[in-house]
Amino acid sequence: MKVLLLLLLLMLAALAVLIVVVLRQRRPPAGAPGPGAVAPSVRPTDPFAGMTELSGDPRGLKAGDVAEYLGQRFFVRGSLRFREGGYTWSEHFFDDAAGTKRWVSVEEDPDLEVVMWTEVVDESLRPSEKTITHGGVEYHRVEHGTATFHSEGTTGLGESGSVEYVDFEGPGGRYLGFERFGGEGWEVGVGERVPNGALTIYPGPG
């Protein structure tokens, strides 16, 4: 009688262990949806959302980037890197889908200064005067020098060379600039200062 009772107790204990093992195997892992639960959907994400470190900071501009200014989106097709002694600055060739072309200069002297330039076709403009009036704006000469450059991407220039420049400044963040590459004729542009944070940059590959 005692042997039968002992065997019965052992069978009950084994059955209890078996039930616990089966229940554990059927339990969903932590964090998994239970029976009848709807798995969370994968939400679409903005591919530019993680690129805030360059938003409004043009110091990292390079060929292949996309830049947006005042609702207009430009492709950065090329860059010129200038050096005069120990001083460096950059100019970037902007082009939009409609064929609008701009140059954007970026320099720190000592504060960051970004200027959007538009080409001027006027053979009467020469940088020999200290003051020039153009488009009803009076500009005063502030700088004249010669620098070397190297080219990246599409710029219309060779890989490297030299440039002579003359810069004029007007009121309200307006500029008039002259550049002469390799001793050729003067290229003229009018510029407007870009407010801090107004230029949004989406970095391209590389």
Image (spheres, grey):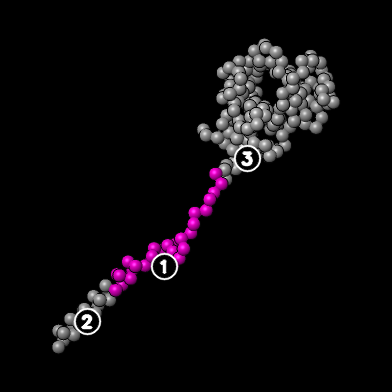
Q: Quadrant of residue 64?
A: top right
Q: Nearer the viewer, mark 1 or mark 2?
A: 1
Between residues 150 and 107, which one lies in front from this camera angle?
Answer: 150
Residue 112 is left or right of residue 9, and the answer is: right
26 up-or-down from 74: above or below: below
Between residues 27 and 111, which one lies in front from this camera angle?
Answer: 27
Asked if the stretch drawn in magenta spans residue 24, the answer is yes
Residue 171 is left or right of residue 39, and the answer is: right
18 up-or-down from 120: above or below: below
Residue name at image x 72 percent, y 26 percent: 118
Residue 55 - label:
3
Question: What is the three-letter code of the residue carrying label 1?
Answer: Pro
Question: What is the three-letter code of the residue carrying label 2?
Answer: Leu
> Looking at the picture, how far across and down is residue 93, in whole percent?
63, 27
Evaluate if marks 3 and 1 touch, with contact meaning CB atoms under 8 Å apart: no
Question: What is the three-letter code of the residue carrying label 3?
Answer: Ser
> Looking at the picture, how far across and down is residue 49, in whole percent?
57, 45
Residue 97 - label:
none
Mark 1 lies on residue:
35
Residues drawn in magenta = 19-47
Residue 136 is left or right of residue 96, and the answer is: right
Question: Dot 2: few (<14), some (14–19), or many (≥20) neighbours within 10 Å?
Answer: few
Residue name at image x 70 percent, y 30 percent: 116
- First in sequence: mark 3 vs mark 1: 1
Q: Nearer the viewer, mark 2 or mark 3?
A: 3
Mark 2 lies on residue:
9
Q: Secondary structure at mark 1?
A: loop
Question: Dot 3: few (<14), some (14–19), or many (≥20) neighbours within 10 Å?
Answer: some
| Mark 1 to mark 2 CA distance (whole Å) | 35 Å
Residue name at image x 46 percent, y 63 percent: 38
- First in sequence: mark 1 vs mark 2: 2
